[in-house]
Amino acid sequence: MSKTLIVPGLDGSPAPHWQDWWARTDPDALVVDLPDPRRPVREAWEAALAAMILRHPDSILVGHSLGSVLIAQMLARWSGLRVRGAMLVAPVDPLADSAGCERIRRFGPLPEVAVDVPTVVVASRSDPWIGFGRSQALADALGADLIDLGHAGHVNVASGFGPWPGGRVIRDRLLDRTQPRPGLRRRPGRTVRGFSPLPAGGA
């Protein structure tokens, strides 16, 4: 089975974050060790993620927050990477005027080119780090599907997301979509509304 490479965001994803839970409970999941998560350097993060992709080709990438932006930037610029699919949860806008953006400004701007990897953007309507319309624009630019979680904050611990089985459901659907099937052509991105965010305690 393909590996799932979990890509944390700014400050990492320590317990009880859903990424930590996922890595501890899924034997096929690995956390990408990004150097100095409190003071991110784009080039260093890119090198760490590229090394993991080269070590585990044809993996599914699951990013959160700045980790999602890192994935999107790399897929847009490095077309030769062997990636099976990407799941971008609660991406941030590095060039917005949100509190804390000075630490991530060098990761901007968000890419505006389509990627050749099946991709899903999982967005919230109440994310303080990015407007929902900006998430929609990112999905459109990448040629990705958009999953609308409703008012789910930044899809982090503060928003009630500890264990998040719904995230694995999205990953499993992406795995199913990327199974090689003769004659199947990739469809354009679309918005999937009303998907249950399944926060801590969800089924």
Image: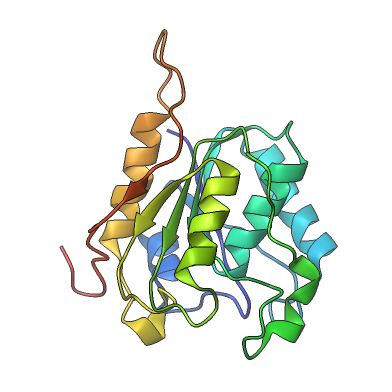
Residue 13: % across, % down: 52, 74
Image quadrant containing the N terminus: top left
How many circles with numbers are drawn on the protein?
Answer: 0
Above/below status of 203 relative to 180: below
Q: Compare residues 13 and 151 and report the one nearer the observer.
A: 151
User: In the visual, does 190 lie left or right of 195?
Assistant: right
User: In the visual, does 192 lie left or right of 53?
Assistant: left
**What is the quadrant of residue 96 in the picture?**
bottom right
Above/below status of 3 relative to 166: above
Residue drawn 70% across the image and 44% down it: 76
Residue 26 visible in the shown view: no
User: In the visual, does 99 lie left or right of 88?
Assistant: right
What colour scheme does the image use? Answer: rainbow
Above/below status of 158 relative to 26: below
Above/below status of 175 relative to 180: below
Image quadrant containing the C terminus: bottom left
Q: Compare residues 37 and 116 and report the one nearer the observer.
A: 116
Residue 59 visible in the shown view: yes
Residue drawn 36% across the image and 54% down it: 147
Residue 15: % across, % down: 44, 79
Residue 64: % across, % down: 52, 65
**What is the quadrant of residue 80 in the picture?**
top right
Residue at the limit of the structure toward the left, as seen here: 203
Residue at the limit of the structure toward the right, as seen here: 43
